[in-house]
Image (spheres, rainbow, N blue to C red):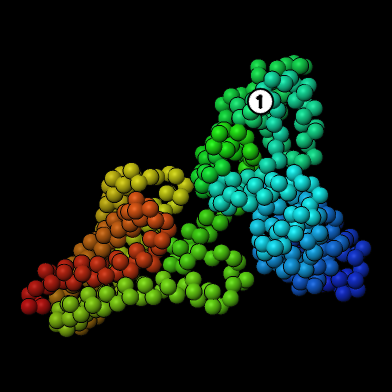
């Protein structure tokens, strides 16, 4: 089947079927689509249309679609369902997805849904998962998995897989535990199939296993799975007992959420906790105004710095022409360095202890970049002066030198600040992403002006004084 593309024609035909209350035709139009495709359609429908379509779906498909919906649509759809209907859909979900859906419900509705669930074991698992912080391995994991006792043999192992297969959608590996449910290792399906009949699990399982505990941070789980190229990782409690597993699809969501949050923070915005179009104008203002005010107050220091050099500017007015050039070059360089370091920290490629290596490298890079931009700035003034002799006057070489040397200093300074500031925040226990590009740029703007006008005072002393 080709990848589904939502077209206006398809949507028009579907709406015609909905308006005609033709549930059979609606089901026919959707039967070949995957749950994410159906969720994409739902996000374009009104709640009344979505409710009608939802009623035409098979329970298992409906449950999968519910997980894929955008937050606002899922919230509205759940509000239109009875507790019994929600319980029926939740019963068809993996425990981690079910816990996520129920967590979004009001407390009184949560209790009603859990009491309506026929599978008391599933309800018990969901309650346990709700007790974990959503940003930990316990909050991410699903309890459905295949486990076998170390003292069993391969025949018993196959029997156990068949017994648990209905509850486990995808079997990546078999977990080996002792009599106390402590995780001992893994048994691959390949090893199980190729081993002699009635082989002891104890003789064929792999005791080398990478696991995480229930309180391991979600981002750390993602880093571990990235490092070891895992598609699934087992989760154990503080006593080492196997309690769940985390699959790669959950980690993709974690990565997306973390990267979205980092990008928003680096842009000087508080992290959004819901989709952009779902947020009210007032809430968006709340998220953006705080940082903008802080950055604005920071930028007022730029005016103060220029006021300090007011006499020099008055005597050589042409200096003011290059202020945007100088501060933007430093700010852009600092933002680049900060972005690279923040990303390196997020991926685990660098640590706080790498600060000296980072500083040495960024000083070298800053000097080279500064020299490149400085030469361009120098020759720009010199060449321009040949065609417009009245702009820079007879001291154009000195002005060109000020611009060139200032660019070297400002770019070097911006590179240094941009690379070290995230590490400092990390050391102090803050999120490095809050050393956003605008924040670094504002800091470098102010200090860049000081560098620029100090250079002008020294190189143009015969003009200024």
- Residue 175: give x, y in percent of width and height: 66, 30
For disc 1, the marked residue is 179
Residue 197 vs residue 438, the one in the foreground: 197
Q: Give coordinates of residue 356: x percent, y percent.
A: 28, 45
Q: Nearer the viewer, residue 276 or 108?
A: 108
Report the side of 193 relative to 103 (left or right).
right
Q: Residue at x 83, y 72 (%)?
A: 15
From the viewer's perspective, is 424 left or right of 395? right
Residue appearing at x 34%, y 50% in the figure: 427
Q: Name the secondary structure under disc 1.
A: loop
Query: Residue 127's spot in the image, x, y percent?
Result: 67, 50
Within 10 angstroms of label 1, few (less than 14), some, or many (20 or more) residues? Answer: few
Q: Residue at x 39, y 45 (%)?
A: 350
- For the question of whether residue 60 can be seen, the reply is yes
Rendered position, 33 above or below 72: above
Q: Quadrant of residue 44?
A: bottom right
- Displayed quadrant of residue 293: bottom left
Question: What residue is rendered at 67% in x and 67% in y?
Answer: 72
Query: Which quarter of the rendered picture does the C terminus lie within?
Result: bottom left
Q: Is residue 6 left or right of residue 246?
A: right
214, above or below 191, in the image: below
Q: Would you identify the image quadrant in which residue 188 lies?
A: top right
Residue 429 rendering spot, x and y as whole percentages: 38, 53
């Amino acid at each position: 089947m080709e990848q589904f593309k939502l077209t206006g024609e398809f949507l028009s035909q579907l709406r015609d079927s909905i308006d005609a209350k033709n549930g059979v035709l609606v089901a026919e139009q959707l039967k070949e689509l995957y749950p994410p495709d159906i969720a994409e359609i739902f996000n374009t429908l009104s709640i009344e249309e979505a409710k009608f379509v939802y009623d035409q779906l098979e329970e298992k498909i409906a449950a999968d679609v519910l997980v894929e919906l955008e937050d606002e649509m899922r919230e509205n759809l759940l509000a239109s369902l009875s507790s019994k209907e929600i319980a029926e859909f939740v019963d068809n979900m993996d425990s981690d997805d079910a816990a996520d859906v129920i967590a979004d419900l009001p407390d009184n509705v949560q209790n009603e849904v859990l009491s309506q669930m026929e599978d008391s074991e599933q309800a018990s698992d969901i309650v346990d998962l709700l007790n974990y912080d959503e940003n930990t391995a316990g909050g991410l994991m699903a309890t459905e998995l295949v486990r076998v006792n170390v003292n069993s043999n391969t025949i018993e192992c196959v029997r156990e897989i068949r017994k648990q297969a209905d509850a486990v959608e995808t079997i990546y590996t078999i977990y080996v535990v002792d009599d106390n449910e402590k995780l001992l290792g893994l048994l691959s399906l390949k090893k199980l199939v190729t081993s002699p009949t009635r082989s002891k699990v104890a003789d064929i399982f792999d005791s080398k296993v990478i696991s995480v505990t229930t309180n391991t941070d979600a981002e750390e789980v993602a880093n571990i799975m990235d490092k070891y190229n895992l598609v699934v990782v087992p989760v154990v409690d503080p006593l080492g007992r196997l309690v769940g597993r985390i699959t790669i699809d959950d980690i993709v969501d974690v990565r997306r959420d973390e990267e979205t949050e980092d990008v928003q923070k680096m842009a000087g915005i508080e992290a959004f906790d819901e989709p952009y179009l779902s947020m009210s104008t007032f809430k968006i203002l709340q998220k953006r105004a705080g940082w903008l005010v802080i950055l604005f107050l920071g930028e007022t220091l730029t005016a103060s710095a220029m006021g300090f050099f007011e006499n020099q500017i008055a005597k050589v007015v042409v200096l003011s022409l290059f202020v945007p050039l100088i501060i933007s070059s430093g700010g852009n360089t600092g933002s680049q360095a900060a972005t690279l370091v923040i990303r390196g920290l997020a991926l685990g490629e660098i640590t706080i202890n790498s600060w000296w290596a980072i500083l040495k490298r960024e000083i070298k890079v800053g000097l080279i970049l500064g020299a490149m931009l400085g030469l361009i700035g120098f020759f720009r003034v010199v060449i321009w002066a040949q065609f417009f002799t009245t702009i820079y006057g007879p001291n154009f070489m000195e002005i060109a030198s000020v611009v060139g040397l200032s660019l070297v200093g400002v770019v070097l300074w911006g590179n240094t600040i941009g690379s070290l500031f995230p590490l400092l925040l990390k050391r102090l226990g803050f999120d490095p992403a809050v050393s956003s590009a605008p924040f670094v740029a504002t800091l470098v703007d102010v200090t860049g002006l000081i560098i620029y006008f100090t250079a002008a005072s020294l190189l143009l002393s015969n003009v200024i004084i």
